[in-house]
Image (cartoon, grey):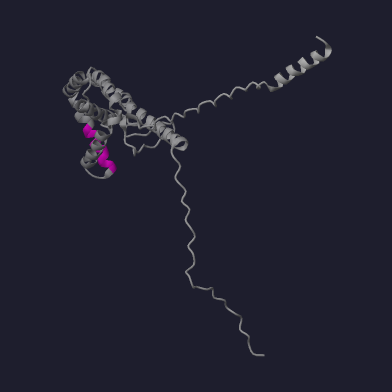
Amino acid sequence: MNLSRKIIVAGLLASVAACAPKPVAPPPPPPPPPVAVVIPPRPLPPGNASLTQILPARGLDGRFVTANSGVTGDKAFWQLKIGLNVAAIGCRGLEESTLVSAYNNIIKTHGKVIKSTEKSVITQLGKENKNNGIAPRDRLSTQLFNYFAQPPAQRAFCPRANEIAQIVSSTPTAQLLEQAPAHLARLDEPFNEFYQAYAQYQVDVVAWDAKYAPKPATIMTPATPAPVGTTASVTLPSSGNH
């Protein structure tokens, strides 16, 4: 092959190469799928409590101040007896039979202490209210019955009441008043724990609403146009006589 033919072949090859289709670039990768936002359910009150539950005030120790806080002496035993009475009437779990049996034994064995402490409470309330103390005793009894019967705390209250009823039932009468404040404080713990849980629920629901609750729509109120045909009045200065 002479030189000219080599040049011609090379040119033809170059032309063919130039006419060949260029490789197509692969398509870009699809965008990543959007990250799913999982919204947790809005917090609910503990123990199926009311949305409008009112909590008592807290003491300096951070615990809630209840009708049983700091109660001592005869009144402590009297309030303890009311709490156990509520439990014996209302608790229907596994502890029902032993709780009722222990409470009935308390009534039978410690009847004199029950009567004497109630008389002491009536006298104390009578001095505070300047009356015979019966009506204040009844009001306090109703308050305590309603307190110990709060449904959200019953799951923890009933086994605690059963535990304490067994102890009180077998305690010598001479030691009842000495031990009553400690027993009353333990019987009150389930309610304080419920209040603590409800206070935390209030914090959690505020945080949830701030993060997930839909924002209220902003409504723009159009300006009210002036009535057609009205003109602004202009007060001209008086010319005066010169």
Q: State the image coordinates of residue 143 (x, y, percent, origin top left).
A: 26, 37
Q: State the image coordinates of residue 231 (x, y, percent, origin top left).
A: 52, 73
Would you say 142 lies left or right of 11 here?
left
Residue at 43 percent across and 38 percent down: it is 213
Between 229 and 172, which is closer to the camera in this rendering? 229
- Quarter holding the C terminus is bottom right
The quarter of the displayed image where residue 145 is located: top left
Q: Which residues are magenta?
A: 118-128
Would you say 183 lies left or right of 107 here?
right
**Exactly how many numbered labels are in the figure?**
0
Residue at 48 percent across and 70 percent down: it is 228
Between 80 and 125, which is closer to the camera in this rendering? 80
Q: State the image coordinates of residue 116 (x, y, percent, origin top left).
A: 21, 30
Between 146 and 105, which is closer to the camera in this rendering? 146
The quarter of the displayed image where residue 16 is located: top right
- Quarter holding the N terminus is top right
Would you say 150 lies left or right of 19 here?
left
Would you say 85 lies left or right of 184 here?
left
Tell me if residue 216 is in the magenta stretch.
no
Secondary structure mostly seen in magenta is helix
The answer, for residue 111, to whether it is visible in the render is yes
